[in-house]
Amino acid sequence: MEMIQTNRLDRGFFRYQEEFEQKALAVLRSGWYILGKEVAAFEEAFADYIGTKHCVGVGNGLDALILAFRALKIGPGDEVIVQANTYIASVMGITINGAVPVFVEPDPFYQIDAERIEEKITERTRAVLVVHLYGQAAQMDKIEKLCRERGLKLVEDCAQSHGAGFRGKTSGSFGDIGCFSFYPSKNIGAFGDGGAVVTDDPKLAESIRILRNYGSEKRYYNKVIGVNSRLDELQAGLLQVRLKHAEELNAEKQALAARYQAGITNPLLSKPMVREDADHIYHQYVIRCEARDALAAWLKEKGIGTIIHYPIPPHLSEAYRYLGYEKGSFPVTEKYADTVLSIPMYNGLTEEEQETVIRALNAFQG
Ligand SMILES: *Cc1c(COP(=O)(O)O)cnc(C)c1O
C-alpha cells in the first residue's frame, strides 16, 4: 500500500489545476514579473480577507517578521516577549534586528500563556510576539488588553493561522502588525516562497513597502538601506487562486480534525484542545504521547508518516546557545518538544486514509 504521508501538496494543486495553470500562463505571458498588478491585486484581496487596511507582500515569512520589527524600530537594547515553543523563525525575526527574545511558556492550547506574560515585562520590553501555533489563535482578548495597558507593540506571527479567528476577528488583525508566510505547506501556500505583512497603520505599511525594495519608493531614489524581499508576480497570481478557495480549504481541514477528534480514543494519546471562542484551522493536527518515539515508529511500520513540530525548542538550539539557557529552563516547552507528534493533515486526505491512521493510533499499546 502507498505510504500515507504527513502532507501532500499535489492534491491541493490538482483540485484547482485548471485555475492555477491559467493564472500561471497569464502571468508568464504578461511580460511583467516583479511588483506589478498581480501583487497589488493579491495585497488588496488579502488585506480584505484578514480585515486590515493594508497588506504588503514580501519574500517569505521570516522577512515579514524581520521587516515588521524593523519598521517598529525595535532593535539593540530592546526586549520582545515570545512563546518558547515556537518555530525558530519567530525568534530569528527578533534577533536578526539585534533585539533580545524573552521566552514565555505556552498554555495547554500551545500558544503563549497569557497569564505569564506580565511577569516578564521589564523597562526594556517593547513588544509581544504572539504565534498562533498550529492554526489556533492565542488568548487575544487578554493579550491585547495587556499590551494596551503597558504600552507594548503587539506583533502576530500568523505563518500557521491564515483565517484562524478568535471572537469574530481574524488573526493578523489584532496587533500592530500581522506577519504571514505562504510557504507551500501553509494553509494558504504558494508554489515557492512568499510572505506578507498586514496592518491598519498606513505609516507602517509604507515603511515596509519601502524597506522590501532597497529602501526606495521611487526607482533609484533610496531613502533608507532596505532589503530585496518582494513577493513576485507569479506567486501573487497563484496566491489569488488559493485565497479564493481559502474558506473551503480551511473548512475541509476542520472536518478532518473533527473526524480525528471523534475517532481517536486511545487513552495513551492527548488530542488537541480547542480554546473557547477560537476558530482553529488546523495547520497541523498535533497529538501528544509519553511514548512519542515508539508511537512514530509504530505508525511508520504501518505506512503512516508523522513529523515533530518541533523537536528542539529555540532556547536549546545551537543558534541560541549565546542566550545562556539550559535544559530545564522552560519545562512545559521541553515536555511538549519531547511528546508532540503531527499526524497526516492536509487538503485531499481521504476518509479511507484517515480511517487507516485512526485504526493504527487506537491499536498502539505503548
Ligand atoms: C513557516 C513559519 C515561519 C517562516 O516562514 P517562511 O516563509 O518559511 O520564512 C515563521 N513562523 C512560523 C510559526 C512558521 O510556521
Image: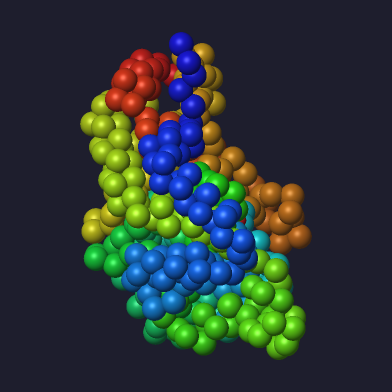
Residue 7 visible (yes or no): no
Q: In this view, does 309 lie to the left or right of 143?
A: right
Q: Could you say which is closer to the camera, residue 81 or residue 225?
A: 225
Residue 304 position, x and y percent, is 47, 21
Q: Where's the C terminus, which quadrant?
A: top left
What is the total number of numbered labels drawn onto the structure image? Answer: 0
At 38% from the left edge and 37% from the top edge, which residue is drawn? 15
Residue 329, horizontal then vertical, whole percent = 60, 54
Q: 11 or 220, which lies in front?
A: 220
Left or right: 271 with respect to 133?
left
* Residue at 39% across, 84% down: 149
- Identify whether 280 is placed above or below 347: below
Q: Which of 279 and 107 is in front in this view?
A: 279
Image point (24%, 65%), residue name? 167
Left or right for 77, reference 336: right
Ligand 1 location (quadrant):
bottom right
Q: In this view, does 285 lie above or below 145?
A: above
The location of residue 197, given as percent across then percent down, is 51, 69
Residue 281, x across and y down, in percent: 34, 49
Q: In which quarter of the image is residue 73?
A: bottom right
Identify the colour scheme used: rainbow
Q: Is residue 217 visible?
A: yes
233 lies above or below 21: below
Q: Quadrant of residue 289?
A: top left
Name which residue lies at 33% across and 41% down: 253
Give the residue furthest to the top. Answer: 1
